[in-house]
Amino acid sequence: MAAMCDRSVDPKAMDVFDVCMAKAPSVKTIEISLLAQEPATEGCRGSVIWITRGLLLEQTQIMLRMDLKEAGP
């Protein structure tokens, strides 16, 4: 690759490897976006809230499992 060969002469040649990735949206941002898209129905809880709470429970379980593993037997 030309950038690898040219790096000793011109360090700016390595700029092709400078990847800029956008930060992923937070869970709260996604939840708000989904809630805005969900049709408002009287008396029904939205599936977005159920999914969000399920993901939060799963995340808590993973963190608990990691803490227990770190604590040992």
Image (tube, rainbow, N blue to C red):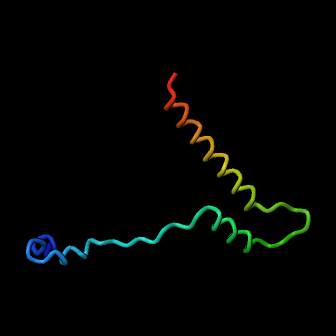
Q: Is residue 10 above or below residue 35?
A: below
Left or right: 47 with respect to 22? Answer: right
Q: Quadrant of residue 9?
A: bottom left
Front-lying residue, 31 or 46: 31
At 87% from the left edge and 62% from the top edge, which residue is drawn? 44
Residue 32 position within the rendered picture, expressed as x and y whole percent measured from the top left: 69, 69
Q: Residue at x 54, y 35 (%)?
A: 67
- Going by the picture, which residue comes out furthest to the right? 43
Residue 24 position, x and y percent, is 51, 66
* Residue 71 picture location, percent across and down: 51, 28
Image quadrant where residue 43 sits: bottom right
Residue at screen point 16% across, 74% down: 11
Compared across the picture, whether 63 is left or right of 43 comes to left
- In this rendering, position of residue 21 left or right of residue 17: right
Closer to us: 34 or 68: 68
Percent across and percent down for residue 49 are 75, 59
Q: Is residue 46 above or below residue 37?
A: above
